[in-house]
Image (cartoon, helix red, strand yellow):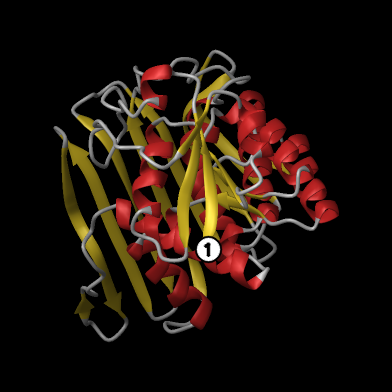
Amino acid sequence: MIQVGIAGIGFMGMIHYLSYEQTRGIKVAAVCELDPQRLAGDWRSIRGNFGPPGKEMDLTGISRYAQIDELIAAPDIELVDICLPPALHAEVAIRALQAGKHVFCEKPIALTAEDAKRMVSVAARAGRLLMIGHVLPFFPEYAYALDVVRTGRYGRLLGGTFRRVISDPQWLTGYYDPQKIGGPMLDLYVHDAHFIRLLCGMPRAVFTTGRMRGAVASWFTTQYQFADPALAVTATSGVIDQQGRTFTHGFEIHLEQATLLFDFAVIEGQPRQLMPLTVFDSAGRVQTPQLGSGDPVDAFQIELAAVATAIGSGAPADILRGELARDAVVMCHKQTQSLKTGRIVKL
């Protein structure tokens, strides 16, 4: 049984905790949190864009630490799950790796490309696994699209459009601070950067337009340039001041013999499948694959099952690799540079 310690009990820490409860071969043995109420199991103050509300939790039998070094030093902990603010990801991950622990870290891997590269390098030297929680490819619609592209079921990928938008997360302190969270580019859009990197490889250049909020991009649309000039990909993401629609994401992916369409939103607190994943093929057929419950929390359970498998096998799945997460951060910073300068930026 893999013993995991969760560092940080906020929204993602809670989602991970609930997901581990449903995952075989791995269990939460410890949590680390500065807030004494949350450390005691009172999670009622936790909130997010989806999933269940926080509640009082029974943490009987789980070690509780107020300091991260205590968690890292715990001899029974094999995996440190980092759900801390992004500014702390690199420092804590490196300390855990150097202490001989495997690391699963929520996205983004780090706030800077330099820190991301350092984390990957330390993991390699330590002989430990560094896995990054880009959960999007584990969502059934995105998993289906990735499988279709990789297997060539409908021919070659021609391109597509991707969208990820949230209402202003007013409960998050420091959201627009580039030294703390990094705004929607690194907190939100980085999911699509990672997915586009998986589907298409690393772009050669980006051109981004949009709006800034202080030092960070707040709303933006990017056109990507790839080695294949016929591969046409765009993405739109950011924050809007419309609290009635707290979250929306989706895509339209073009293949030689089909188009995949998906559109989801949370409106007035209720999830809505505006367009379930639909396949429009070149023969005129319209198909709606059956993909599961639709509960977004299920994707985290699938992701953490992949983490457990990776530790058992000694090698992470491609989706979890730190190198891909590093590339996503590089893409984010190049897009911000393009938005600021109004120019095409090479990667």
Front residue of this view, candidates 91 and 145: 91
Say what amino acid the circle numbered 1 marks.
Ala
Front residue of this view, candidates 88 and 24: 24
Is the residue 280 above or below the residue 276 in the image? Answer: below
Residue at 67% from the left image edge and 33% from the top image edge: 92
Q: Which residue is mark 1?
A: 308
Front residue of this view, candidates 240 and 231: 240
Could you tell me residue 246's position as x and y percent? Answer: 26, 32
| Outermost residue, front side | 61
Decide: few, some or many residues near mark 1? Use Cα within 10 Å; few <14, some 14-19, many ≥20.
Answer: many
Could you tell me residue 222's position as x and y percent? Answer: 53, 42
Could you tell me residue 309's position as x and y percent? Answer: 54, 69
Residue at 69% from the left image edge and 57% from the top image edge: 129
Could you tell me residue 25's position as x and y percent? Answer: 47, 65
* Residue 295 shows up from this direction: yes
Residue at 36% from the left image edge and 39% from the top image edge: 60
Is the residue 107 above or below the residue 318 in the image? Answer: above
SS for dot 1: helix
Q: Specify whether 45 is left or right of 23.
A: left
| Outermost residue, right side | 125
* Residue 231 shows up from this direction: no
Q: Specify whether 297 is left or right of 336.
A: left
Front residue of this view, candidates 218 and 268: 268
Count of numbered badges drawn on the protein: 1
Residue at 49% from the left image edge and 26% from the top image edge: 33
Is the residue 128 above or below the residue 90 in the image? Answer: below
